Amino acid sequence: MRVEIWSDIACPWCYVGKARFERALAAFPHRDGVEVVHRSFELDPGRAKGDTGLVLPMLMQKYGMSEEQAREGEKRLGENAAAEGLDYRTEGRDHGNTFDMHRLLHLAKEQGRQDELIGLLYRANFAEERSVFADDARVVELAVEAGLDEGEVRAVLADPERYADDVRADEREAAELGANGVPFFVLDRKYGISGAQPAEVFTQALEQAWGERAPLTTLASADGGDACGPDGCAVPQA
Amino acid sequence: MRVEIWSDIACPWCYVGKARFERALAAFPHRDGVEVVHRSFELDPGRAKGDTGLVLPMLMQKYGMSEEQAREGEKRLGENAAAEGLDYRTEGRDHGNTFDMHRLLHLAKEQGRQDELIGLLYRANFAEERSVFADDARVVELAVEAGLDEGEVRAVLADPERYADDVRADEREAAELGANGVPFFVLDRKYGISGAQPAEVFTQALEQAWGERAPLTTLASADGGDACGPDGCAVPQA
């Protein structure tokens, strides 16, 4: 079974939702039969790289919140994160463009290090003081910590087209699947779950999708299908 | 869309079938949306590592073929391979245990090099004089050529439990899906294709599975689903 998770590093509910999903998965009896893939989704794709700022003033300006509302929202997010055992800085956190981080997550996917890297990026963005948006230095450190080669990471960052199509393909696919926000979880391309649902919702979804793994329909042709089995290989006709 | 291919390095129809499938995939308009995963299947799991022999005598002993029948079968396989542009040695090829090669294919999968490694293993086994079964040296060379780290490859070969569960899980899954021979192709866990079918069968299957990618069923709870979108993040209630 395969679970795809569309998310953005800048999305606090993705950070919380991932932890809730993982809590459900850790208790799922068939967890070894579940493959998790992270897909790219940018909340603010139009923001230029390097155009960064603090989250609280952004919430006030962009969404017309009062300072009290913005602080209250961050405080509640922090409480939700804490309930999952996650650190969350409710003040001083910044925001910015995440396209390059998504490109690196595709590099990491090729090398089986995607889950490591996304976990480190979330933690760095939401729980640590040093910015992941101010320059590339922190992101390079995290990628190396996730097991990627520093030279390869720098080469990808230096070439804006590397993995750019993969990021855009993920985003196009999210739109096709009807996702207009994240996190967005898709189980075996059959069930979609929007948002940081309680772990119980993920547990039920895992059970349901697992139970409904459908038998295969066999496709074949009259004149083909030569195969090898325990009793040897088919010998084709002359 | 995802295509999983169960196969064994020692299976000539897998070598031919992979090429036929790839010919269909190369001409498929949505090929960039198709992910290919190779799964493990051993034709002769009981054979001890190091217990190797030539293919022609084995066909005669194990399957009771006459020498003429065995040679004729290999000749026809060679003709089928040649029709796909593949080299195939009809004489002098050996056989043996493939468990360690499957373990390395799982290591390669983690690093995004699985397709490279399986292609090199097939070519070495079916088209080149030097044995892939006689000792580990040739397999190590091929793994390094596929982009793996030599030290890591040797460490995996030296520890028989590394990736062993992954190989066995693939084989268990093949049985659950009803495969008793290889190659066995599975499209989106919906359609199964057994054997080295003509490329046209793969083309039709790709078109059919692509056209039937189903819309998602949304699962949700009444009290969850906080998400972030272009208009900001949901603020949870106190």
Image (cartoon, coloured by chain):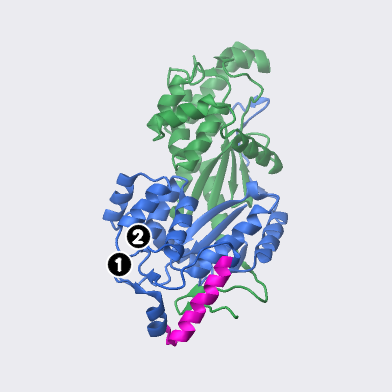
Chain colours: A blue, B green
- Residue count near mark 1 (Cα–Cα under 10 Å), binned few <14, some 14–19, many ≥20: some
Which residue is under mark 1?
A49
**Residue lying furthest right:** A211
* Residue B23, percent from left and from top: 45, 43
Residue at disc 1, secondary structure:
loop
Protein chain holding label 2: A
* Residue A125, percent from left and from top: 42, 63
Q: Main secondary structure of the magenta part?
A: helix
> In this view of the protein, which residue sits in the foreground, A188 or A22?
A22
Kindly identify which numbered label has been placed on residue A100. 2
Q: Residue at x 30, y 58 (%)?
A: A136
Count of all numbered marks drawn on residues in the image: 2
* Residue B213, percent from left and from top: 57, 61
Q: Amino acid at mark 1?
A: Lys
**Residue lying furthest left:** A158
- Whether the magenta-drawn stretch holds residue A64 is answered as yes
> Does the CB distance between marks 2 and 1 fall below 8 Å?
yes
Q: For the residues marked 2 and 1, what is the alpha-carbon distance in whole angstroms?
A: 9 Å
- Whether the magenta-drawn stretch holds residue A128 is answered as no
Q: Which residues are magenta?
A: A63-82
Protein chain holding label 1: A
